[in-house]
């Protein structure tokens, strides 16, 4: 477009941000609002970003296409929703037994991950940027105790993505449905179990009223990354300073989400356990061990789907092998040293 060269400090840009979340949804929708506000405020109003909740402009699962086509200049979602575009997208959201939030950011910003992500979205005319991380999620809500692998057999559980495939191979029946339907499905017995996010979001949905056992850790989503999707043409029309503002705001929003989840999960967990008498339980070691073995199989199979998936898998696996050495003598050793 002609005004690329003409864009200057006076040019105003009106951007639409479509999201995969209900408007103002705690943590996720609120992060989209924050990102839009930061871009608008930091640019002194030179870019005005208006946020649309899921379904307001396009449905949640059409965010990617809307940004790709330029119907919206920005999107806010999770990369694993776009599996239909490429299996490789899953490496940029959540990998069972994969990287945690800190390690994920390290891979993306300093381990070549973000560059690979940009390459993957390039054919769609989209620039991706990490814009939030939930941290380690919870394994989920169950209506019975899980004492052995056999307890997973025939279990009807809502668990999306690669984790869902792992549970299926462990003998469960996996179902995917939007968050808004989970409560009634658990209540009616359509589901025996569900995962969602963590205490902060799970308390808001009231799962403690319909399932008794709350299991940890979220082996299937150890550090789920949320993404900002930016239409490449719209981005290229911005003067350099505004481009920096957009990308820096994404970084700030990324840091904000993990901080918010850590603080709010902690408060919500206290409410769940002490006010609602939720039974907080660890998954048994043997169950975790089996899920881990199946996960290795499932994740490495994704690498065989395409050359790009193989390249990304190689990058993230190599990074994981290296960072584990450091994490074990830093975070892990420190948590142990700090005690309970
Ligand atoms: Ca989840």
Image: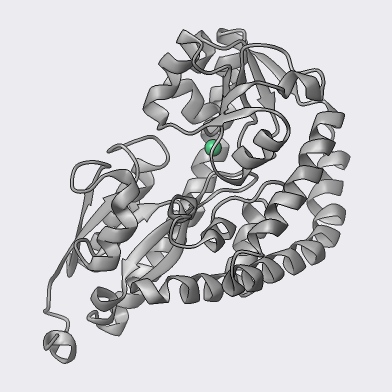
Place of residue 314 in the rendered image (x, y in percent of width and height, measured from the top left): 71, 70
Q: Residue at x 82, y 47 (%)?
A: 332
Toward the bottom, the furthest residue is 5
Instruction: Please indicate whether residue 139 sits to the left or right of residue 338 in the image.
Output: left
Instruction: Please indicate whether residue 212 sits to the left or right of residue 147 in the image.
Output: left
What count of labels does the image hold?
0
Between residue 36 and residue 22, name the one nearer to us: 22
Q: Residue at x 32, y 76 (%)?
A: 243
Place of residue 329 in the rendered image (x, y in percent of width and height, measured from the top left): 87, 55
Place of residue 75 in the rendered image (x, y in percent of width and height, measured from the top left): 32, 57
Place of residue 239 in the rendered image (x, y in percent of width and height, measured from the top left): 25, 83
Q: How is the image coloured?
A: one colour
Asked whether the viewer can see residue 183, the reply is yes
Q: Quadrant of the N terminus?
A: bottom left
Q: Quadrant of ligand 1?
A: top right
Taking 284 as reference, is 73 above or below it? below
Q: Quadrant of the C terminus?
A: top right
Q: Which picture quadrant has residue 56? A: top left
Q: Residue at x 12, y 78 (%)?
A: 11
Instruction: Please indicate whether residue 332 sits to the left or right of residue 159 in the image.
Output: right
Taking 13 as reference, is 238 above or below it? below
Taking 236 as reference, is 75 above or below it? above
Asked whether the viewer can see residue 206, the reply is no
Taking 180 as reference, is 49 above or below it? below
Q: Residue at x 17, y 70 (%)?
A: 46
Instruction: Please indicate whether residue 85 sits to the left or right of residue 313 in the image.
Output: left
Between residue 127 and residue 133, name the one nearer to us: 127
């Amino acid at each position: 477009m002609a005004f690329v060269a003409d864009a200057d400090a006076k040019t105003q840009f009106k951007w639409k941000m479509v999201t995969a979340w209900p408007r103002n949804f705690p943590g996720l929708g609120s992060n989209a609002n924050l990102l839009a506000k930061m871009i608008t405020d930091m640019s002194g109003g030179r870019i005005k970003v208006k946020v649309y909740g899921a379904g307001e402009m396009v449905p949640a699962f059409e965010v990617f296409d809307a940004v790709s086509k330029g119907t919206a200049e920005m999107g806010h979602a999770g990369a694993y929703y776009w599996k239909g575009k490429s299996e490789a997208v899953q490496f940029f959201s959540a990998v069972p037994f994969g990287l945690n939030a800190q390690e994920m950011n390290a891979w993306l910003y300093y381990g070549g991950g973000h560059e690979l992500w940009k390459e993957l979205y390039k054919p769609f005319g989209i620039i991706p940027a990490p814009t939030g991380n939930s941290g380690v999620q919870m394994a989920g809500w169950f209506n019975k105790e899980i004492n052995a692998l056999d307890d997973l057999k025939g279990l009807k559980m809502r668990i999306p993505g690669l984790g869902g495939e792992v549970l299926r191979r462990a003998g469960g029946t996996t179902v995917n449905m939007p968050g808004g339907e989970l409560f009634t499905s658990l209540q009616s017995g359509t589901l025996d179990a569900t995962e969602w996010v963590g205490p902060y979001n799970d308390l808001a949905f009231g799962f403690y009223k319909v399932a008794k056992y709350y299991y940890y850790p979220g082996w299937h989503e150890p550090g789920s990354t949320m993404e900002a999707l930016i239409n490449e043409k719209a981005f290229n029309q911005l003067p350099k300073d505004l481009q920096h503002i957009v990308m820096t705001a994404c970084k700030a929003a990324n840091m904000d989400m993990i901080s918010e989840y850590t603080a709010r999960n902690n408060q919500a967990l206290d409410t769940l356990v002490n006010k609602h008498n939720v039974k907080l339980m660890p998954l048994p070691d043997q169950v975790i061990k089996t899920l881990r073995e199946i996960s290795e199989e499932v994740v490495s199979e994704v690498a065989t789907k395409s050359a790009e998936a193989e390249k990304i898998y190689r990058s993230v696996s190599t990074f994981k092998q290296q960072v584990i050495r450091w994490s074990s003598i830093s975070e892990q050793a420190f948590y142990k040293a700090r005690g309970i």
